[in-house]
Amino acid sequence: MPEGHTIHHLAAAHRTRFADRTVRVTSPQGKFSDSAALLDKTPLTEVDAHGKHLFLGFAVSGWIHIHLGLFGKLDFGTPPIPPPTDTVRLRLAHDTAYADLRGPTTCALITDAEKQAIHDRLGPDPLRDADDPERAWQRISRSRTTIAALLMDQKVVAGVGNVYRAEVLFRHGIDPYRAGRDLTRAEWDAIWADLKALMREGVRENRIDTVRPEHTPEAMGRPPRVDDHGGEVYVYRRATQPCHICGGEIRTAGLAARNLFWCPTCQRA
């Protein structure tokens, strides 16, 4: 599932291509046809993102709420615009650009109040400047749940997925099985600041890179990572491989229905 940096990257792409433009809105697949008809030939006036949720605002008719889920995909292109396939749930288009949405978990037209209800149930997002990490800290500092599970709970912190969860805990030497209430405030503040920096870089580059300059392939004289997810990382999907820092074996285990990756030497209990 795409992590928050991807959704904010897609939001920026929509702003660049469609903001304040009158757009054609269609649903070649047919599942969004009634709502598309209400929005067709009206201006897209706002774009918003919170965690893994994307919102496209139309002043007259509300917001398109998109959650890509596991299989959703958004593609952008320029003219000549090809005929859409019958897998396209939503197409936005005007004379210089188009965007096709396929396979989302959610694509729905919602009201301002319904949009606010989604924001209200989500935790603070490191990529939203106005979001307050204190909200997350209040839940984390009282919880017996592991910090690894709490970081993946979108009601606690919005937008963090399996990669950023594993990597930020490694970067701060924190055992993923430590209970939230055993985290210090200084550790939480450092994690939040690091997530903001890492995820902003992810938005800019549209990929996740988490290794510090001294641990890049060039600096260490090691081969670059080869993985569909791209980016240089410390522990994510590196089970049984040597840690870049201590040389110990990276481990993996199931936690909260996802695979957890960590270095037991660098992240001591």
Image: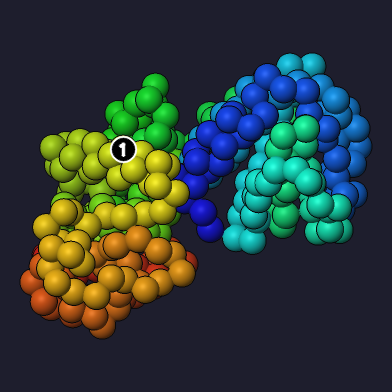
Callout 1: helix, strand or loop? helix
Few, some or many residues within 10 Å of mark 1 (<14, 14–19, 20+):
some
Kindly identify the residue that appears in the image at 57 percent across and 37 percent down. Answer: 13
Residue 168 in picture, x, y percent from top left: 26, 52
Residue 118 in picture, x, y percent from top left: 59, 33
Please state which of residues 116 and 99 is positioned toward the viewer in this rendering.
99
Please state which of residues 130 and 180 is positioned toward the viewer in this rendering.
130
Image quarter for residue 69?
bottom right
Q: Disc 1 marks which amino acid?
A: Lys
Residue 222 in picture, x, y percent from top left: 18, 74
Kindly identify the residue that appears in the image at 16 percent across and 36 percent down. Answer: 185
Residue at label 1?
196
Kindly identify the residue that appears in the image at 22 percent across and 57 percent down. Answer: 211
User: Is the C terminus in the top left, top right, bottom left or bottom right quadrant?
Assistant: bottom left
Kindly identify the residue that appears in the image at 69 percent across and 52 percent down. Answer: 104
Left or right of residue 201, residue 241 in this image: left
